[in-house]
Every structure is written in C-alpha cells, then in structure tokens.
Image (cartoon, helix red, strand yellow):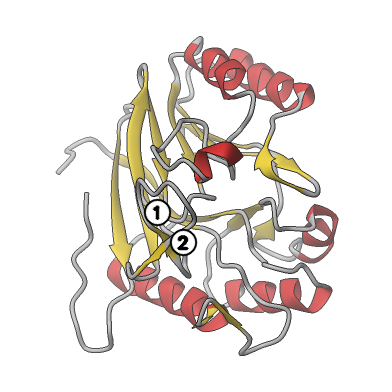
Amino acid sequence: MNSVARAASILQVTDPHIMPAPGEKFYGLDTDRTFRAVLEQAFAENTTIDLILLTGDLMQEPSLSGYQRILTMLEDFPVPCVCLPGNHDDYRLMQQVLNEGNIRCESRLFLNNWQILCLNSQVPGYPGGHLEARELAFMEDCLSKNPDHPTLIAVHHHCLKIDSDWMDTMMIDNSRDFLSLAAKYPQVKAVICGHVHQAVDCRFESIRILSAPSTCIQFTPASREFSIDDTAPGYRMIDLYADGSMDTSVGYLRPAGRESEPGR
C-alpha cells in the first residue's frame, strides 16, 4: 500500500454500448443493466471515488433518448463525470445532453495536484482513431504550462498494439506522434483508453498505458479475428498520489452474492 497521501481516486468505465431502446440487447446483454450494475458494484467496493471517466462508445447507435438515459443513470452517483466520445458516438449529441450538473464533456480538469487531459480521437464515420493537430497542440500547451502537475491523459482509442490483429487496425493512426510528444514531458504518468474491451497494462518509455474492460462484452485477447469471450463486464480504479505515483486495479461484475476479486 502506498504511504504517500492520495490525491484522488478515478473510476474508469468504458464502452457501455447503450442501445437505442431500453431492454434492447447487444450480443445478448442488456447494456443498460450491465452499465448500472458495474457502477453500483464499483461504488460499493471503493470507499472513495472522486471522478468517473467514461472513455467512449457510450452508445452503439446514438440517439437523444439514449444519451438521456445515460445521463439519468450517471446522476444517481454523486461525483463528477467526464465523458469522452468513441467511434460509435455522436459527439454533438453528447455535448448537448451530457452537460448537466456534475456531468460534462470537457477537455481538462485538475484533481488536487493532478492534471487530467481528455482528448478526442474520434473520426466520424470511421472505426479507427486519429488525434488532429489541434488536439496535439492543446495537449502540448497544457503540458508545457503545467510542468509541476503530474498528468493523466484519457482518450478512447488505443495507442499501442495489443497483439489483436483485427483490433490493432483501429488504433490511433498517428500514435507515434502522440506518444513521442507525450514522452517529452516527464509529468505524463499514464494514458488510459477504452475501445479494446479488455484490460491492458503496458508501458511506452516511462508512461503507463492502460485500458479498462467494457461494461458490456469483452473481446478475446490476442485474437486474430473478431471474437467475444466470457469475461464479465468490468471497470478500472486508478488511485493518484501527491508524489505523482499511482496504483490501479480492475474489478469485474460478480454474480449476486459472490465476492469480487479485483486484479492489480
């Protein structure tokens, strides 16, 4: 256990793929139900959550009513939530609906001494990701002006290959530029993403690269083609400390009455 003072605890949930109609299923799952169940379990299992980061693919088929259902579910949890767009989302609709109270689509916030940057990797109409020049310029401006703030960067698409042939065709296509720029700034501690529907924990130089399991289906790791495995819906917790260090764990939805065993 880290003896340094904790600055903040972040709950990352991702890729809920909420369907247009309540009760409609996605590969056999009621994604409204699993999204709410994951949030409820995460809050039951973690005594402190200061921020929810919802890292994209909020909906499978975007609709005003669907984003309104997501807003209603998030409003039941009394902490700020920042929502990022994924390749399935309509970002204009997201910005229209998810802009109430603690729930926002915003690009930067501070949690005590930590800086959180939220980048948009969406390419409308295309499953892969790209970070436009203005996103990279925004990131560099924030980093250059805040050298003393340890920084976590959130984005939807993954930026390093995960040895999954079909999924790696849909990563950020200018990842080299993004990671090379991030690595110039030693205060960048981690990049977190969604998109891959599985937990990944690796490094690029000194930067930790993390993904979270989806709150619905999980993709089979190291699969050459599209494949779904039987891993339960899940989430990632990220504890940030005042000295710039961090701890992280992954929790999975458990059947009623069973204790979960988060993995670190």
Dot label at residue 76 = none
Q: Is residue 261 left or right of residue 80?
A: left
The picture places residue 99, in percent across and down from the top left corner, at 76, 61
Question: Which residue is depicted at the point 45% across and 71% down?
Answer: 39
Q: Give me the C-alpha separation between circle 1 and circle 2.
A: 7 Å
Residue 115: x and y in percent read: 53, 32
Quadrant, the N terminus = top left
Q: Residue at x 52, y 72 (%)?
A: 77
Q: Nearer the viewer, residue 124 or 79?
A: 124
Q: Nearer the viewer, residue 258 or 167?
A: 167
| Circles 1 and 2 in contact, beta carbons < 8 Å | yes
Q: Residue at x 59, y 58 (%)?
A: 81
- Which corner quadrant of the image does residue 118 belong to? top right
Residue type of the residue flagged with mark 2 = Ser
What is the crowding at mark 1: few (fewer than 14 residues within 10 Å), some, or many (at least 20)?
many
| Kind of residue at badge 1 | Gln
Q: Which residue is mark 2?
A: 214
200 relative position to 102: left or right: left
- Residue for point 56% across, 67% down: 16
Q: Earlier in the sequence, mark 1 or mark 2?
A: 1
Residue corresponding to mark 1: 198
Q: Position of residue 60 (x, y in %)?
A: 67, 67
Q: Give coordinates of residue 220: x percent, y percent.
A: 37, 57
